Image (cartoon, grey):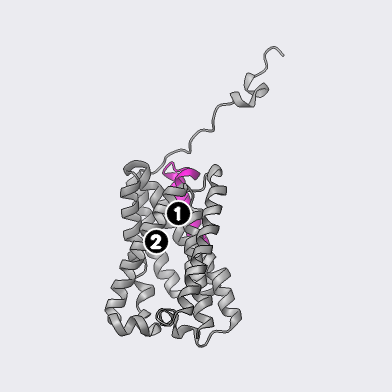
Amino acid sequence: MAGQDPAAQDPAAAPPPAPPRRVLGTRTAVALTVAVLVAANLAVHRWSGAWGLLTSVVVSGALIGVLRLAGGTRADLGLAPGTLARGARWALALAGLVAVVYLAGALLPVTRPLFEDRRYAAMGGGEVLLRAFVLVPVGTVLLEETAFRGVLYGLVARERGPLRATAVSSLLFGLWHVLPSLHLAAAKPAVGGVLGAAGAVVGAVLFTAAAGVLFCELRRRSGSLLAPMGLHWAVNAFGYLVGYLLR
């Protein structure tokens, strides 16, 4: 029909959606993200239960907002529509691998003490399930993966590449675990007996920084944030389940 927009007749001819407007520079966005995470780290260390879950959801949303203000896209976040199926497959495979490793570790006498944790002594089965299937995925994985492998990684990788993004994200991820590891030596005798209280904190920071490198590489290789999310959830959740069964 004369005068009709060609794009309306042929959807393929329609122009691609405009990128989000860039209000913040990358450095400003990274600095703002770190500031939000410092406040969030203090909050989640102080609050637990429903308040901790609410904090995780609110902070995750705020950080995604920072990414958008810096011109970031779903691809920068690691959640581009075309990568979701592949990321889900990676997540399922990694969770299965963790389950096999944990089962073997729990059955072998030489590694079984590593799963012993005094914090499980007063926990019932319902609380363990709540932690594994609600508190871990929403209160821990959602916030940490959105922040470190999503927003921070995406902001830095866009301008500095994946190597610099991995370094920044993993270093901050290690420092994020200073407060949670302050009582690690008392909770885990196998760790505290070898490293002591201060050594347990340093060890936790180094270990989680190294884990951050692995998570970043999983995000890079899979192209999806779902891959590190799956592994992160499995490591924490299966740790609760195995530790409870071995108490």
**Residue denoted by label 1:** 63
Q: Nearer the viewer, residue 64 or 135?
A: 135
Q: Nearer the viewer, residue 129 or 96?
A: 96
Circle number at residue 209 = none
Separation (CA) of disc 2 from disc 1: 9 Å
Count neighbours of disc 2 (C-alpha within 10 A) and say few if under 14, some if 14 to 19, many if 20 or more: many
Report the span colored magenta.
57-76
Q: Residue at x 41, y 41 (%)?
A: 23
- The kind of secondary structure element at disc 2 is helix
Can residue 26 be seen in the rendering of this structure?
Answer: yes
Residues tagged 2 and 1 counted as in contact (Cβ below 8 A): yes
233 left or right of 189? Answer: right
Quadrant location, the N terminus: top right
Give the percent coordinates (x, y) of residue 4.
67, 17
Count neighbours of disc 1 (C-alpha within 10 A) and say few if under 14, some if 14 to 19, many if 20 or more: many
Can residue 56 be seen in the rendering of this structure?
Answer: no
Give the percent coordinates (x, y) of residue 201.
31, 74
Q: Residue at x 30, y 72 (%)?
A: 203
Residue at far right of view: 1
| Mark 2 vs 1, N-terminal side | 2
Above or below: residue 189 compared with residue 207: below
Give the percent coordinates (x, y) of residue 109.
43, 82
Q: How many marks?
A: 2
**Which quadrant of the figure has residue 193?**
bottom left
Q: Amino acid at mark 1?
A: Leu
Give the percent coordinates (x, y) of residue 19.
48, 36
Q: Amino acid at mark 2?
A: Leu
Q: Residue at x 63, y 19 (%)?
A: 6
**Residue denoted by label 2:** 37
User: Does the magenta stretch mainly form a helix, a strand or a loop?
Assistant: helix
